[in-house]
Image (tube, rainbow, N blue to C red):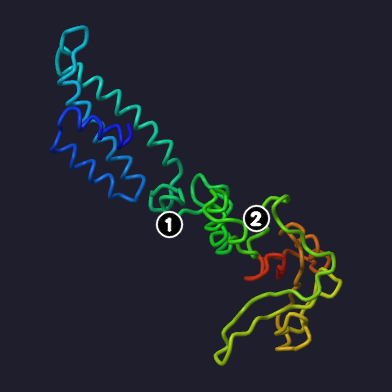
């Protein structure tokens, strides 16, 4: 029963005490979970007073036992709605609903990534994904470095010739530098390689060196693994993608 209907009952039956206080409280609540809970309480109070003044076939409802049964039925029906509305919870047992919970994440129970999140990147992108799925944010607000989570119809496809690709942005103390890798026309590059600081890959910032690794340009982790396999004789790991470019993944042993 909505607040509007409850107010109508209040005016009809002249309830000016407990129910009125509950209605005023409901109107001040932003959290939908608590608002729903207080609506249940207000509805129960309304029925209590309504049953006390209602007559059926000319006779008053016999006794409190009947009233209690009717009230239980009411609360049972509203509880079913409450359970379905909070299906799936986060790690603090709060509803995994981004409309109610700022911590809601596609990686939590009931989310589209439930049971699939092993790395920080998964959780970071899962926060955006659940909000995109429920239209709280739009595609323009969804970060490019999470695009690999989208369906093939939604996700942008990698370029055939990747060329110069943005990788990361870092504060080096005196300024903030945006880094780029130059793939040219190949889907892979190997250490050592130049790291550039301009989007045309003409100004070299440093040379990447160290332990052997393969940088690949692919739309999914499986495609990245396939591209890296010829470079490794044993097991290797594929990361989740560069911070600013989910197509650029590093394979390392």
- Residue at 68 percent of width and 80 percent of height: 179
Residue placed under numbered mark 2 in the picture: 149
Residue 63: x %, y % from top left? 14, 15
Identify the secondary structure beneath mark 2.
helix
Q: Is residue 74 left or right of residue 115?
A: left
Numbered label attached to residue 52: none
Residue 45 seen anywhere in this rendered image of the structure: no
Residue 142: x %, y % from top left? 60, 60
The answer to whether marks 2 and 1 mark residues whose Cβ atoms lie closer than 8 Å is no
Circle 2: is it few (<14), some (14-19), or many (20+) Cα within 10 Å?
some
Residue 71, picture quadrant: top left
- Residue at 27 percent of width and 40 percent of height: 38
Residue placed under numbered mark 1 in the picture: 102
Residue 8 seen anywhere in this rendered image of the structure: yes
Residue 5: x %, y % from top left? 30, 32
Q: CA distance from mark 2 to mark 1?
A: 21 Å
Question: Does residue 78 lie above or below 245 as drawn?
Answer: above
In front here: 183 or 16?
Answer: 16
Which quarter of the rendered picture does the C terminus lie within?
A: bottom right
- Residue at 17 percent of width and 28 percent of height: 13
Residue 199, picture quadrant: bottom right
Q: Is residue 93 left or right of residue 110?
A: left
Question: Does residue 51 lie above or below 186 as drawn?
Answer: above
């Amino acid at each position: 029963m909505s607040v509007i209907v409850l107010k109508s009952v209040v005016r009809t039956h002249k309830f000016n005490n407990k129910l009125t206080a509950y209605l005023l409280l409901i109107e001040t609540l932003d959290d939908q979970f608590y608002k729903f809970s207080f609506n249940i309480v207000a509805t129960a109070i309304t029925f209590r007073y309504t049953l006390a003044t209602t007559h059926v076939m000319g006779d008053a409802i016999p006794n409190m036992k009947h009233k209690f049964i009717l009230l239980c039925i009411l609360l049972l029906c509203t509880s079913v709605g409450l359970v379905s509305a909070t299906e799936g919870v986060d790690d603090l047992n709060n509803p995994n609903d981004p409309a109610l919970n700022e911590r809601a994440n596609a990686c939590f129970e009931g989310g589209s990534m439930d049971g699939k999140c092993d790395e920080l990147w998964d959780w970071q992108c899962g926060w955006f994904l659940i909000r995109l799925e429920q239209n709280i944010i739009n595609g323009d607000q969804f970060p490019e470095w999470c695009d690999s989570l989208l369906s093939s119809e939604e996700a942008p496809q990698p370029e055939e010739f990747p060329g110069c690709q943005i990788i990361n942005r870092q504060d080096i103390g005196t300024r903030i530098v945006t880094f780029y890798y130059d793939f040219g026309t190949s889907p892979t590059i190997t250490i050592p390689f130049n790291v550039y600081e301009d989007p045309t890959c003409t100004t070299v910032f440093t040379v990447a060196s160290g332990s052997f690794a393969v940088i690949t340009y692919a739309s999914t982790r499986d495609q990245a693994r396939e591209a890296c396999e010829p470079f490794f004789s044993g097991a290797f790991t594929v990361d989740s993608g560069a911070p600013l470019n989910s197509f650029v993944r590093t394979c390392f042993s």
